[in-house]
Amino acid sequence: MSDKEHKEPFLSSKNKDEQSLWDKEIADVKKLKKSNIYNTKKTKNNQKLTKPKEKEKYISKQNDTVSADTSFSFHEKTPQIDKTLSEKLRRGKIKIDQKIDLHGLTQSEAYETLVKTITAAGQRNKKCLLVITGKGRKTCDGEPEGILRERVPKWLVTPPLAPLVLMFQEASIKHGGSGAFYVLLRRRKTKT
């Protein structure tokens, strides 16, 4: 059923007159393109939000990967991992060496736990960690508010974690989807 074919509710003659007046007023109004719609609500820090579709580069999506290099920049870069490993990650079929559940922790507790656990895992030559952040609550407009989900990617690409992290990627649905990340650690150089 198209917009013009919608069923009209029962209207009294007064309401019909008002409806016809309204229809005349909006007759030349054009629908906005979705790409031109901006979210004008302000954040907690009183900053205007950008286009809803614009995502920060450091949050990786299902098939994208983000690499942390020693320059500690936030640019996207696909590390040199083989296709089979990349496919295993995408499908959630990689062996997870350790899980880190940050869900329900404060930011400072989560940061401390993440640093300690990743540092220890790196020293034990662990390869893949599953970091569970949770998805966070939804705001009144339906947008997710997950503070840890937003912060963890930033923490992973800045010292002291960046030198340990090869790359991270949003987990597959069976491992938590957008509420978790796979974190691949760099191999330790062995002294011989």
Image (tube, helix red, strand yellow):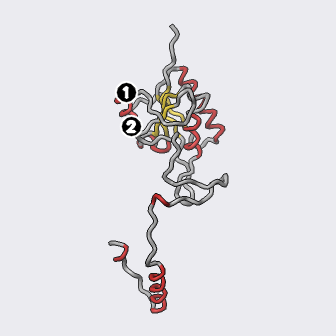
Disc 2 from disc 1: Cα separation: 13 Å
User: Which residue is tagged 1?
Assistant: 82
Classify mark 2: helix, strand or loop.
helix
Residue 52 position in % (x across, y down) = 51, 54
Q: What residue type is disc 2 on?
A: Arg
* Residue furthest bottom in the image: 13
Q: What residue type is disc 1 on?
A: Asp
Q: Nearer the viewer, mark 2 or mark 1?
A: 1
State which quadrant residue 91 falls in.
Answer: top left
Tell me: 82 left or right of 126: left
Crowd class of label 2 (few under 14; some 14 to 19; many from 20; radius 10 Å)? many
Vertical relation: 192 (above or below) 145: above
User: Which residue is tagged 2?
Assistant: 90
Question: Upstream in the sequence, badge 2 or badge 1?
Answer: 1
* Residue furthest top in the image: 192
Quarter of the image where the N terminus is located: bottom left
Tell me: 90 left or right of 148: left
- Residue at the image point whose x is 56% and y is 42% from the top: 103
Classify mark 1: helix, strand or loop.
loop
